[in-house]
Amino acid sequence: MAILTKISWARSELATNQQYIADFILAQPEMTVTLSSQALAERVGVSQSAIVKFSQKMGFKGFPALKMAISEEIGRNRVLAVNQQNALHNRIETHDSLLVISQKLAQEKQSSIAETTRRLDFEQVAHIVACLDSARCIQVAGIGGSGLTAKDLAYKLQKIGLMTLAEADHHVQIAFSQTLTEKDVLVVLSFSGKRRDMLVTAATAKKQNATLIAITGNRLSPLAKMADYVLETVAEENEWRSSSISSRTAQNTVTDLLFMALLQRREEQARQLVNNARTMINSLDG
């Protein structure tokens, strides 16, 4: 996710003095990259240490690294502006041909996959895979577009012998989460990480001491703060993304990785189960 977008997303979750910093950066990014941490602190009216803490909150070691990320984004935006008439970009226009739309969608999906993969902490992914592999029961929860990804993940895990449930009705999701134990895992997919129904399901599972895995586009969201493990999905959504195209692409990147890692880990058992299921399904046609 672009750093200015990330700051904008995180703003509502920040302390008051950090919101002042976020507001200044979002309003004047080009000026921000010319300032030292002390100069920015004076302009915003906060301490220099607050600038450093804000930078770390955004995922950087310090203010110089944050400035570098902002500078790179400004540079990318300038290139897009200069080449706007000829270059493909995220916004799909009403006059675009089917060919151009397909090219823009391909570029957007490739960007989501690449950026999501780049952000993954593979040591954490390995821990998550181990948790899923040893779980007594796995619940996968999501609403709307995230619900489609949840259903797909559950189906794949079922095929390789993992007892998994994905229910679209959020009342059922909450009810089932009450049955989880410390031996179980709840995977919640929510791009915003703020949906109340998902937060209630997650909180209920946590009360039951189940392991909570969050797959979200907002690492600073209430869902992410509640989770034992967080996998970040990166997607640039706009008004044309009514069906959450890029966010579902990012989510599928993560869920497919988890599935393939589990398939690799459970190779012999998984292969036998998949073959048995295929044989039984084929017999229905006879």
Image (cartoon, helix red, strand yellow):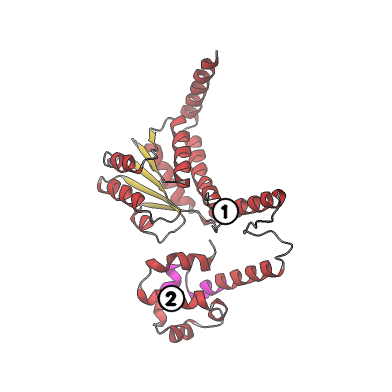
Q: Position of residue 21 (x, y in %)?
A: 44, 77
Q: What residue type is disc 1 on?
A: Ser
Q: Nearer the viewer, mark 2 or mark 1?
A: 1
Which residue position is annotated with label 2? Answer: 52
Position of 90 relative to 271 (above/below):
below
What kind of secondary structure does the magenta stretch mostly adopt?
helix
Q: Could you give the CA–CA distance between mark 2 and mark 1, rounded to whole angstroms?
A: 29 Å
Which is more toward the observer, 126 or 72?
72
Position of 178 relative to 272 (above/below):
below
Could you classify mark 1 by the number of other residues whose Cα lies within 10 Å: few (under 14), some (14-19), or many (20 or more)?
A: many
Image quadrant in which you'd find residue 34: bottom right
Q: Quadrant of the C terminus?
A: top right
Which residue position is annotated with label 1? Answer: 112
Could you classify mark 2 by the number of other residues whose Cα lies within 10 Å: few (under 14), some (14-19), or many (20 or more)?
A: some
Point out the tag, 2 or 1, that comes first from the N-terminus: 2
Q: What residue type is disc 2 on?
A: Val
Q: Which residues are magenta?
A: 52-68
Which is more toward the observer, 263 or 91?
91
Residue 121 visible? The answer is yes
